[in-house]
Image (cartoon, rainbow, N blue to C red):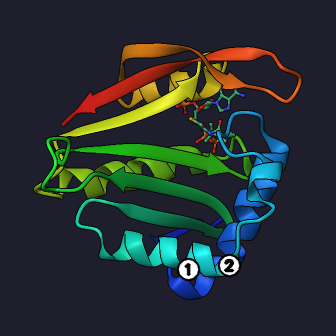
Amino acid sequence: MELIIEKARVSQAEEVLKCIRQAAEESNNLIVTTENLKNYTVTEEKFLIDGYRKSKTGLMLVGIVDEKIVSLGTLQGNSLESKAGHRVTLGVFVLKDYWNMGIGRQMITALLDYCVGNPYIEIVDLDVRADNYAAIGLYERFGFETIGGYRDYFKDGDGSYEDAILMALYL
Ligand SMILES: CC(C)(COP(=O)(O)OP(=O)(O)OC[C@H]1O[C@@H](n2cnc3c(N)ncnc32)[C@H](O)[C@@H]1OP(=O)(O)O)[C@@H](O)C(=O)NCCC(=O)NCCS
């Protein structure tokens, strides 16, 4: 299997949105829900991708297998004029049919390579559901450490709550 990782283009907005919708259906670990995404438009996604492309610290990467987007990796930056300009927040998901093939690992590697090469980024943050052991283990193997958490951060459709763990990697 060949994985191509590239910077998301505005022209990919429709496919990117489709991929996010599918991931939200397949996994309970994302913060966005199918309901949430219903009213989200391709125009909005285009605007978002354009913003990532113009940002000095933000980044959206797509992972492509057989010409299909199967993974998304993002770094959300803060305004460089703010006091949090040296931090970015990492996010990643892989479509279910492609789990456990090394794609998540390769996406995170590409995101972190970008961070290391970026003069503004000093700390990479992320938040993850406390019960998402696969993702937590993966982040730990990249050197992320737990720096805190939010109790009851996620509220699921059935009304139950789950904590979030905050992790950070100091470059
Ligand atoms: C978490 C996620 C990104 C991992 O991507 P992936 O492509 O399946 O992971 P990889 O194949 O690269 O495997 C990476 C490592 O995780 C381990 N792993 C993957 N799935 C696992 C599971 N369900 N249980 C335990 N370990 C698991 C692999 O063994 C591998 O170990 P290694 O680092 O020692 O090689 C993917 O499962 C996913 O998108 N899940 C749904 C959304 C999500 O949870 N995103 C993260 C939100 S913070």
The residue under the point 72% across, 15% down is: 161
Q: Helix, strand, or loop for circle 2?
A: helix
Image-quadrant location for residue 79: bottom left
For the image, the number of numbered tags is 2
Above or below, 84 against 52 in this view is: above
- Report which quarter residue 70 is drawn in: bottom right
Q: Which residue is mark 1?
A: 46
Residue ranking furthest to the right: 158
Residue 112 in the image: above or below residue 51: above
State the residue in front, 158 or 171: 158
Q: Residue at x 39, y 24 (%)?
A: 167
Q: Residue at x 51, y 55 (%)?
A: 73
Q: Is residue 96 visible?
A: no
In the picture provided, is 144 more to the left or to the right than 122? right
User: Could you tell whether 15 is left or right of 58 in the image?
Assistant: right
Instruction: Please name the residue that numbered disc 2 is placed on.
Output: 42
- Pointer 1 local density, CA inside 10 Å: few below 14, some 14–19, many at least 20: many
| Label 1 to label 2: alpha-carbon separation | 6 Å
Residues at circles 1 and 2 in contact by the CB criterion of under 8 Å:
yes
- From the top left corner, tell me how far across and down residue 147 is, in percent: 34, 16
Secondary structure at numbered mark 1: helix
Q: Is residue 164 left or right of residue 52?
A: right
Q: Which mark is on residue 147?
A: none
Quadrant the C terminus occupies = top left
Quadrant location of residue 114? bottom left
Q: For the view shown, which residue lies furthest in the bottom direction?
A: 11
On-image quarter of the N terminus: bottom right
User: Hey, what amino acid is under mark 2?
Assistant: Val
Q: Residues within 10 Å of mark 2 (few under 14, many from 20)?
A: some
Give ligand 1's quarter of the image: top right
Q: Amino acid at mark 1?
A: Lys
Is the CB of the residue bearing disc 2 within 8 angstroms of ligand 1? no
